[in-house]
Amino acid sequence: MMQGWDFEKPVVELEDKIEELKKFSSDKGVNLSAEIKNLDKKLSILKKEVYSKLTPWQRIQISRHPKRPTTQDYIDIITDDFVFLHGDRLYGDDKAIICGFAKLDGRKVVVIGHQKGRDTKENIERNFGCAHPEGYRKAMRIMQLGERFGMPIICLVDTPGAYPGIGAEERGQAQAIAENIRDMFALKSPIIVTIIGEGGSGGALGIGVGDRVMLMEYAYYSVISPEGCAAILWKDASMREEAAKVLKLTGSDLLKLGIIDGVVSEPQGGAHRDYELTADNLKKALIKSLDEVSSLSTEDMLTQRYEKFRKMGVFQE
């Protein structure tokens, strides 16, 4: 049974009905191909109706789907020979961020990304993808190691935000993120960033400075979560849908504002509906971006990276 949000119920119910008919047809040896074909047509029309007019809040719900592909899923599908690298050499190993070396289409790369869990136990272990300072320090250590070997860097962002707990603050959360932002501007390796799910606040920016910044179709990228914004502006977290609208956090808005460089398409309804297709789309986008950036001289690459972010927030009345 497919899991879905409230606005997806008609789609999920029809999908379940089709699966039941297919199973009944197979088990009982009854030819129901005509009925199934008719329902498939209805499903296609219904999906277009539901997913062509999603609100920003509904897109956020899809980005948080419990079965949405994680960094580890993409690593398994699109890379070869991945080798995990652990620890920040200062405090410990943060499981909310995974790092390592891999091959992408035969090219040696560094892969760094936030990692959420699949169930409650794993989410607690990985802190729901909310990194501590040691996670960001680990990420920078591996980025600098990759730079030393001339390897491009791929960052996959999926976090509601950096962990705001007392321990994280005691160990220098703000400083760790600030240093990563500063040091990523100086790295002499190409950096390609993709927000694959949630791109929340400084937690995202800690590994989010790149020559190309892309967003998955149903992902979001924002200075704060809609719930946090609603609590601050309206003192009422139930205003999250209104907050999602004003934050301009969807792909179309972010492209217009010059925050991202492109949107990576997903299957209708979200990446969780077809891992292989989504991963293939991401792989093609990463290779294209790497080819573009790798053609630049190091000086031009660093200059363009700096200017890209300096332009953000500039406006005319």
Image (cartoon, rainbow, N blue to C red):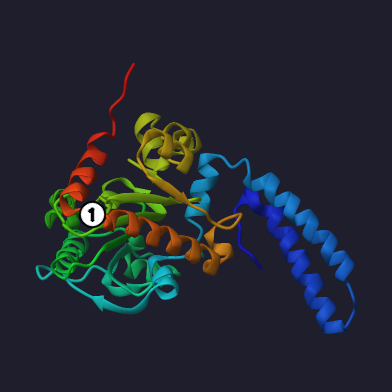
Residue assigned mark 1 = 165
Is 21 on the left-hand or right-hand side of 219?
Answer: right
Could you tell me which residue is drawn at 54 percent across and 56 percent down? 266
Q: Nearer the viewer, residue 276 or 118?
A: 276
Residue at horizontal 70 percent and vertical 45 percent from the top: 49
Can residue 61 be spotted in the picture?
Answer: yes
Residue 249, located in which quarter of the rendered image? top left
Q: Quadrant of residue 270?
A: bottom right
| Left or right of residue 52, residue 125 in this image | left
Q: Is residue 231 above or below residue 205?
A: above
> From the image, which quarter does the C terminus lie in?
top left
Please state the horizontal and vertical placement of residue 41, each as a whole percent of the image: 79, 56
Q: Residues within 10 Å of mark 1 (few under 14, many from 20)?
A: few
Q: Is residue 251 above or below residue 141?
A: above
Name which residue type carries label 1. Gly
Residue ID at (12%, 58%): 171
49 or 4, which is in the foreground?
Answer: 49
Percent position (x, y) of residue 275?
A: 53, 67
Residue 238 placed where, x, y %?
48, 38
The secondary element bearing badge 1 is classed as: loop
